Amino acid sequence: MREVAVIGVGMNKWGELWEKSLRDVFTEAAILALDDAGVDKIDSLIVGCMSSGVFVGQEHLSSLLADYLGQVPVPAARVESACASGGLALRTGWIEVASGLSDVVLVGGVEKMTDVNGHEATYALGTAADQEYECYHGITFPGLYALIARAHMEKYGTTREQLAMVAVKNHANGSLNPLAQYPFKVSVEAVLSSVMVADPLRILDCSPITDGAAALILCQVELAKKLKKPIVKITASGMATDTIALSARREITWIESTYQAAKRAYAMAAKKAEDIDVIEVHDCFTIAEICVMEALGLVEKGKGGKAVEDGLTSLRGKIPVNTSGGLKAKGHPVGATGVAQAIEIVKQLREEAGPRQVKGAKVGLTQNMGGSGGSSIVHIFERG
Amino acid sequence: MEGIIGYGASIPRNRIKVEEIAKVWGADAPSYRKGLMVEEKSVPSPDQDTITMSVEASKNALKRAGIDPSEIGAVYIGSESHPYAVKPSGTVLAEAIGATPEVHTADFEFACKAGTEGMFVAFGLVKAGLIKYGLGVGADTSQGAPGDALEYTAAAGAAAYLFGREKVVAEVLETYSYTTDTPDFWRREYQYYPQHGGRFTGDPAYFKHITGAAKGILGKAGMKPADFQYVIFHQPNGKFPLRVGEILGFAKKQIEPGWLVNKLGNTYSGSSPLGLTATLDISKPGDIVLIVSYGSGAGSDAFILKVTDRINEVRDLAPKTRELLDKNRNYLEYGMYAKFRHKIRMAE
Amino acid sequence: MPTPSRYWREIPQRYRLEAGKCKNCGFIAFPPRLVCPRCQSRVFETIVLADVGKIVTYTIIRVPPKPFSDQAPYAVGIIELDDGVRLTGQIVDFAFEELKVGQRVKIEFRKVYEEGEAGVIYYGYKFVPA
């Protein structure tokens, strides 16, 4: 396997992008990445997108996006793993370069979510769950994570305030990110008094509906050296699946797929949780960040809430998590999230994160998750 | 001997009081209470309908009968609120209890006597030897037009009866049916609420057919009111069954155990069938019971039953009717009641 | 919203709680499946699930998906039946304040939703006070 580097990143400001269609949103981010990398030809295009068929009636993104990027006849693929589609695109692109099949790969993620109303968006997102045995009964994604939150609160004494603190931290970081959908701070009181969505989760516990895209250029390390780019290597890719239905999980409060994916990634990079300087995790809901912290081994099982309260993961804390603002403040255009997480880590390792910079960051990790934990993808990045 | 081998009831937990309805329409609650002898009625939750209540009542009947449901040869639901205009309710019930595919199913309709019709035919097929077990259910989620007198009583509930030839709980001694064409209460297709002939629904309708059926069956059986421990009449309001009982020569104490309407309302096709489940719940071996239903349009079905020793073995195997009537009640305000009954609907 | 065939296919599960029990290791699959997730065996027998259990966790949905738009707020939870199988389903006939983890419940046949005024009516299991 060859070593793989990230040589270009591209991301537009995320939000409700009324004037931009799915193809525009993607192409803009892709162009930014190509320019950042200084390349104009790619060997392969991998796009992560969860649900373009439901949101805008468009499949066949391989052809559409290769065409609109002016890259036909490049081989292209659209990959999907619900909200981990972006992470899966990154993994797939990494596999192509590492295996020697391609030298330069554009990895992108995109989701256009605002062309449908709220109910239809909720339905589209629900396709990440068990349609016949979860969605059939009226569960929603906030509902599934609310089930996890209540169980975590019952079992470990995690408090409503601790959940709110995740949102407060991520908004504090997001307020320093010009590309974030909601670049403003929120207080614990604001979270606790926001409208209830699925008890005990309120609207400010939930990541938003967002339009956006993100893209990276991957290439083999030798080529990156030739192009004289700052080298950020992908030193590990780990993926794992778990049951699709939350009711079938062994432990509702524990994200086994993240634990397994991280285990594989740590082994591949010969690293432990303590070695990681900066992390981007999948905070689709505040409780998710707490559970992921535990599954990644940053804290002991059940102690995630307390750790957030103690500031372990704040920007100036021991292990900064979600310096970008996370899904909560940055936004969550589903298929793009996994790629945007990688972009934040690359910026941190290149020391280009401005006011969000974690000093001396050399090793970073991204964790991207699908559904209620049915799939997880972990990547480790190192300054080369 | 052929007869009832299992019986079961299902009553929703929601209630609305006469006062709450009267308040909204500016009516005089005390006079409605007194005139109808009804205090409150049951209201189905939005996720309950004739089919769901039939399933629960039938499961209770199966608990008492202790038979293999795949041997049920006929499944009939009688209702005036079948959820579909075309697509049988009975097939959903038959699937839910495991009676399919070797089973005959039909939906019955005859205003409030559709339940006893289903029972009549299920029993008839058993007696004729065509099937081993037959299931007849009376269930309704009847609608009363807002502001109309019937709104105070139109309620929801279901009662299910399994008939067979072995392990009989109540033997059917006699059956009788009395029918004429009498337009006292009707609903045209595509109309949401029924209409009725006001006071015409009394003597020429309810009273004529119940007394006709009662006298007919008593005559056929050579029996008189004093021979019975209990009698159940269709209960459109509290007064009518007491009055018809008096007219026929029955005592109040014979009627009381099966008189549920003051706390339940009129469950239409479930009305006399639920009165019968409540009566069986407290009956003793050897008791003779008369049930006379009434359906507008019009007609009455009558059964004479004799309770066997087996009642003591099965009575407690499923929830009793009065238990269902009394427990876990949820009182509604008119707005929530209107939402539950789909009188107001969320905009698309 | 399921098509009639997608709904009809799941009737044995939705109406009668039919599950598949692995003949090799005893794992109960609900809904039934072709491969045992525990031992990879492919031989199952049909069983019916227990109809009583307890609440493992629950929430109250206040922002519903489209088919349930007129039903909110409603409670949904994961219930562990007495045979160890866990299911997701609506919890009804409780005041919200009465809900708690560990609460005993039993299965009842209810309407789950309907497709507007003209579409199919979908039935299934819900959980009520035991």
Image (spheres, rainbow, N blue to C red):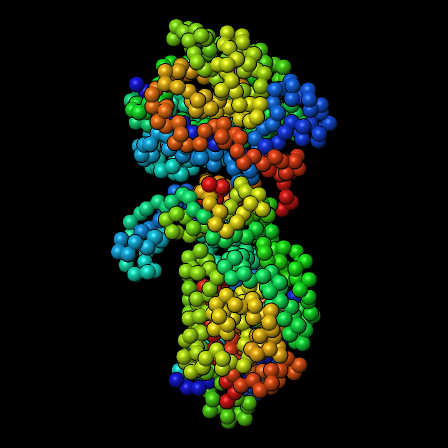
| Residue that appears at 50% across and 85% down | A382
**Residue C53 versus residue B131 in the image, above or below:** below
> Picture coordinates of residue B198 (x, y %)?
63, 17
**Residue B176 versus residue A232 in the image, above or below:** above
**Residue A170 versus residue A100 in the image, above or below:** above
- Tell me: B123 left or right of C76: left
Observer-nearest of A106 and B173: B173
| Residue that appears at 43% across and 77% down | A265
> Picture coordinates of residue B253 (x, y %)?
50, 14
* The N terminus of chain A sits in image quarter: bottom left
Observer-nearest of C54 and B55: C54
| Residue that appears at 41% across and 32% down | B318
> Picture coordinates of residue A5 (x, y %)?
49, 85
- Tell me: A325 left or right of A275: right
> Picture coordinates of residue B125 (x, y %)?
34, 23
**Residue B345 versus residue C24 in the image, above or below:** above
Observer-nearest of B20 and A102: B20
